Each structure stands twice: as structure tokens, then as C-alpha cells.
Amino acid sequence: DVVMSQSPLSLPVTLGQPASISCRSSQSLVYSDGNTYLTWFHQRPGQSPRRLIYKVSNRDSGVPDRLSGSGSGTDFTLKISRVEAADVGIYYCMQGTHWPHTFGQGTKLEIK
Amino acid sequence: EVRLVESGGGLVQPGGSLRLSCAVSGFTFSTYWMSWVRQSPGKGLEWVANINLDGSEKHYVDSVKGRFTISRDNAKNSLYLQMNNLRADDTAVYYCARDGGGSGWYYWGQGTLVTVSS
């Protein structure tokens, strides 16, 4: 199975400051159709995961443009330009190129 | 409004069985693949199984093959997960989710907790 590795696992951030989460895969996530199926989810305590970004950099409806995804091949990044209180929670990357689809361990973002 | 509502979770002894259900509304159920995804403290998020439009194609993560069976009833807009020979490491919150192919799952239920313990 493809292993997804996130860093850091804990991310304390001051309100208004930027934040960045790294996600690395053990194999290239470029699919035969040319797409790269790397997805980011956010989960608040007691809630279901919410998809934020798909195919590396496509934001879902309602996701603020403070959040952006980038990367290619095996190396991906989620960036938050200015952290707000609503951003706290756990962020997961997930690969959908290879079966089974697999998730990273999660990065817990908290406010300093 | 899209809604996915899971039910059927609970406490079960090792080796026991449970059947989870997911009632769906707000979209044409029969035109989407569906998945079960689980979340445990020890293993995080894990895709468990998915099923195609008419139930003729099913896929499972290796750890549940031969023990879990995914099924659907398009007439009832419902998804199911029959779980047999349950083990302690199956303890998790189980979510049903509308499959988005390689882009994962946009719509999720609220989850149902399965606890396997003696």
C-alpha cells in the first residue's frame, strides 16, 4: 500500500500567521489519466471529515482562498495564508491514485 | 440537501457480528459508487470498502476481506456493511460516504461507533 507521511504532526500557530503542512507519498501519485489524486481533508472534534482540496490544488465549494494546495509527484503541501480560529482541527492528506486509497496520519493545528 | 445517516453500531464481543446501515437522501443514490470509511484512534482514517452502482462490483481493504460484506438497496436508498468475525482492531467510527473516485469523498455521514470488546 502507498504510505502517506505528514509533517509536522502537531502545528501550533498564532492567529493571523501562516501555516504549512507537508504530505509525502511512498509512490508517485500521477495516475495514467494524467491527474494527480491528492486530497486534503479537515476534521474538527466530534465532526466528520470535510474535503477541502482535491487533485492537489482544486478547492471545494465554500473553502476560503486562504487555503491552497500545491505539489507534484510525491511531495505535496497545504498552506493557510492567515490562520483563523475556524482552522483548528486535524488535517489529513489522502491519495486516490492507487488502491487502496490511503490517508496520512493527520496534522493537528492548534492556536498558540 | 444531501444526507447520509448511519445506524447499527454498538458494543459487540470479539467474533461477533454487526450490520451497519446508511440511509441516503438528497441525491440519486443509484448513480453513485458508495464507500465505508472508518476511523480508529490507533490507525486513523481507513477506507474499508466500496460498491458500484448496481452492487455487482465490490472492493475491500485487505484487513476485512472475507469478514465484511458491502451491499446496497437502490430501491431503499440504503447502503449496508455486514461485519462478521469482528476483532478488537475493528473498533472505530464507521462512516458511509459518497464515492468521488480518486478525489475521495465529499459527502459523509455523521458516523456510527462500533466497539469490539469482551
Image (cartoon, coloured by chain):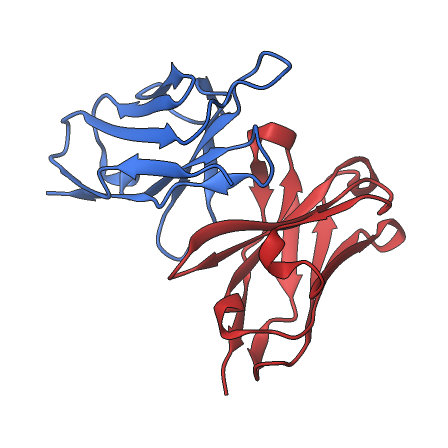
Chain colours: A blue, B red
Q: Dividing the picture into quarters, in which one does residue B22 lie?
A: bottom right
Say how many tags the image has. 0
Q: Is residue B29 left or right of residue A4?
A: right
Specify the farthest residue to the top: A34
Residue B72 lies, with reference to residue A7, above or below; the image says below
Answer yes or no: is residue B48 visible. Answer: yes
Q: Is residue A52 left or right of residue B56?
A: left
Could you tell me residue B29's position as x and y percent? 78, 42
Q: Position of residue A55 (x, y in %)?
A: 51, 21
At 40% from the left and 57% from the top, the residue drawn is A46
Q: Residue furthest bottom?
A: B118
Residue B106 coordinates in the image, percent (x, y): 57, 36
Write the residue at 72% across / 50% down: B24
Say if A27 sits above or below B70 in the image: above
Quadrant of the rendering where the N terminus of chain B is positioned: top right
Closer-to-camera residue (B37/A65): B37
At a point 72% along the width and 56% down the height, the residue shown is B23
Q: Is residue B1 visible?
A: no
* Spot occupied by residue B97 in the image (x, y as percentages of width and height): 62, 46
A103 lies above or below A60: below
- Residue drawn at the location 47% of the way across and 56% of the way down: B39
Of residues B77 and B14, which is closer to you in this image?
Answer: B14
Horizontal arrangement in the rendering, residue A47 relative to residue B63 (left or right): left
